[in-house]
Image (cartoon, helix red, strand yellow):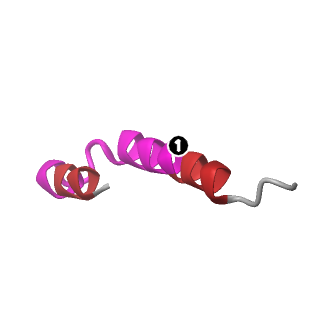
């Protein structure tokens, strides 16, 4: 995520869409791993 933010600042929003897409994919993966297993 840090690299994503750094890349965003370097490109001044040029790759914002790709950045957010990658962020949300990681976020969804994290939520899936962190959720209670009894659901």
* Relative image position of residue 13 (x, y in whole percent): 27, 52
Residue extending furthest left?
Answer: 10
Residue visible at 78% across and 53% down in the picture: 37
Residue extending furthest front?
Answer: 38
Secondary structure at numbered mark 1: helix
Task: Decide if residue 33 is on the left or right side of residue 12.
Answer: right
Q: Quadrant of the N terminus?
A: bottom left
Residue visible at 86% across and 55% down in the picture: 38
Which portion, as a residue range, is magenta? Answer: 8-26
Residue visible at 66% across and 49% down in the picture: 32
Closest to the observer, 16 or 7: 7
**In the image, is residue 19 above or below residue 38?**
above
* Relative image position of residue 19 (x, y in whole percent): 36, 46
**In the image, is residue 22 above or below residue 38?**
above
Closest to the observer, 35 or 1: 35
Residue visible at 26% across and 44% down in the picture: 14
Q: Which residue is mark 1?
A: 25
Q: Residues within 10 Å of mark 1 (few under 14, many from 20)?
A: few
């Amino acid at each position: 995520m840090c690299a994503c933010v750094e890349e965003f600042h370097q490109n001044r929003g040029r790759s914002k869409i790709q950045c957010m897409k990658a962020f949300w994919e990681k976020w969804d993966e994290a939520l899936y791993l962190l959720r209670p297993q009894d659901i």
